Amino acid sequence: MRNISEEAVERVIENMYLNLGEQLTIDDMARTALFSKFHFSRVFRQVTGVSPGRFLSALRLQEAKRLLISTTMTVADISNQVGYTSVGTFSSRFKSSVGLAPSLYRQRGGVRPRIHTDPRRNDWGTRSVSVGGRILPPEDGTTGTVFVGLFPEPIPQGSPIRCTVLDGPGRFRLDRVPQGTWYVLAHSLSDDDPPVPAGPLADEPVPWVGSHGPISIAADTVPLPVVVQLRPMRMIDPPVLLALTFIRTDANATTG
């Protein structure tokens, strides 16, 4: 059952979806939530894991992914439609979050040939460990391929710290995890799924997702097994921005 805070945040996120091209401010969002500005920002982060601004930015990039695949609109027009006043800023943020430049993302049909982990993290700390556990299937429904990634924030975007791809729900292991604070994020794919998952307002099945974290890895850490339950994506879940691949052999993580 949703509480008052979740209902308020969902109201704001629905308004974000309906007004992606508008310059929404924190004051605008707080009024929609019927909260004070400072209380709203705190509650929004508690419910979603990220700030209102980061969530709005993620929704805009998710819509840009959809428009790049489903329309012939120019990159400039898409940039403007999702609320960016600078095409350069839009293209830079799209590439850093999705992993491909907008034009290349369109050219490749929304998928990438392989997923690279973030090489800048490889030498962090003096000791690395393994993080493992199990991905549980949804309580009602079947899944396909499961992508499991370790990210510095609860948004699957950019280059994961470590990642793997499973044939389906089951055990996973991520080796050479550097010191830091990370989130395990899982997303289920099948060959029949579109490259851009449906949003919560669409009349299409939503994707299966799951998360666990934060996990703090220090020099003396022995991580406990992680259990991630796949479930339908909710309104309050940040969208999956990272461009994935449906081909298991190509999706295995590489650095560089």
Image: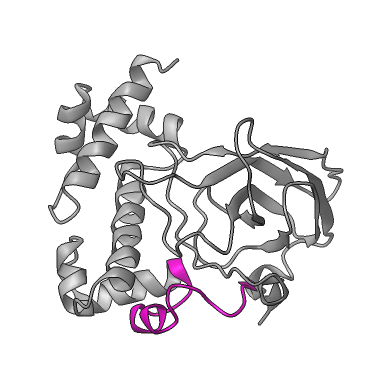
Task: Return the x and y of residue 80 as percentages of the image width and height.
Answer: 15, 68
In the image, residue 88 lies at what x, y percent?
25, 79
**Vertical position of residue 59 compared to residue 224: above or below:** below
Give how far across and how far down residue 57 sits, in percent.
31, 55
The range drawn in magenta is 97-118
Residue at horizontal 41 percent and vertical 74 percent from the top: 95
On-image quarter of the N terminus: top left
Quadrant in the rendering for residue 241: bottom left
Quadrant location, the C terminus: bottom right
In the picture provided, is 2 more to the left or to the right than 176? left
Q: Nearer the viewer, residue 211 or 187?
A: 187
Q: 188 or 1, which lies in front?
A: 188
Q: Quick check: is 103 in the magenta stretch?
A: yes
At horizontal 82% and vertical 42% (from top left) the residue drawn is 223
Side (left or right) of 18 relative to 132: left
- Image color mode: one colour
Q: Position of residue 51 (x, y in %)?
A: 37, 42
Relative height, residue 143 to residue 248 (above, below):
above
The image quadrant that residue 45 belongs to is top left
In the figure, 63 relative to 116: above or below? Answer: above
The image shows a total of numbered marks equal to 0
Of the pair 256 and 78, the residue shown nearer to us: 78
Name the side, left or right, on which 2 lies relative to 184: left
Residue positioned 24% across, 46% down in the render = 17
